Amino acid sequence: MRINDAIPQRGSKKRGRRVGRGIAAGQGASCGFGMRGQKSRSGTGTKPGFEGGQMPLYRRVPKLKHFTVINPKLYTVINVKRLADLPAGTEVTLASLMDCGIVTANDGPLKILGDGELAVALTVKAAAFTGSARQKIEAAGGSCEVVTA
């Protein structure tokens, strides 16, 4: 038999520490809590994450949902319903939309969104399309072409 084989029997429980019962007991007087200070007092100590009044780490770092995107993709967005007034067979690009006054500012490459209805066939050249926008343009007899910008 070795010392590492000496283990307590199954179901046995270790006796709790009796603190503050004199120096012979091993945990007398300050009971292992040191001399003074907040952590030596009775009752609960500080809550987890408390940093002595300094703003704790879990409040200093941004929350996962609200991290700012480092390199956001900015698009000039327009809905399909804004294209319904154009004549059939028109080639729609960001430059052509700015010329006819539908789009007033160039906020990046053109992205077509799917809100509204479209009844005229158009050739749309944009950097991105939503699924519903592509479906509505092609259902009206038009075509969608993805251009890199």
Image (tube, rainbow, N blue to C red):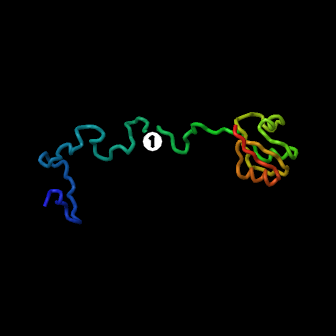
| Residue found at the far left of this picture | 24
100 sits left or right of 28 in the view: right
Q: Compare residues 36 and 114 and report the one nearer the observer.
A: 114
How many numbered discs sit on the rendered protein?
1
Residue 51 image point, x, y percent: 38, 38
Query: Which class describes the residues within 10 Å of circle 1: few (<14), some (14-19), or many (20+)?
Result: few
Element at label 1 = helix
User: Quarter of the image holding residue 87?
Assistant: top right
Residue sitting at x 19%, y 61%? 8
**In the picture provided, is 132 more to the left or to the right than 45?**
right
Question: Picture coordinates of residue 146 (x, y %)?
Answer: 72, 44
Q: Is residue 149 left or right of residue 56?
A: right
Lateral position of residue 48 relative to residue 121, left or right: left
Mark 1 lies on residue: 58
Outermost residue, right side: 87
Rendered image quadrant of residue 34: top left
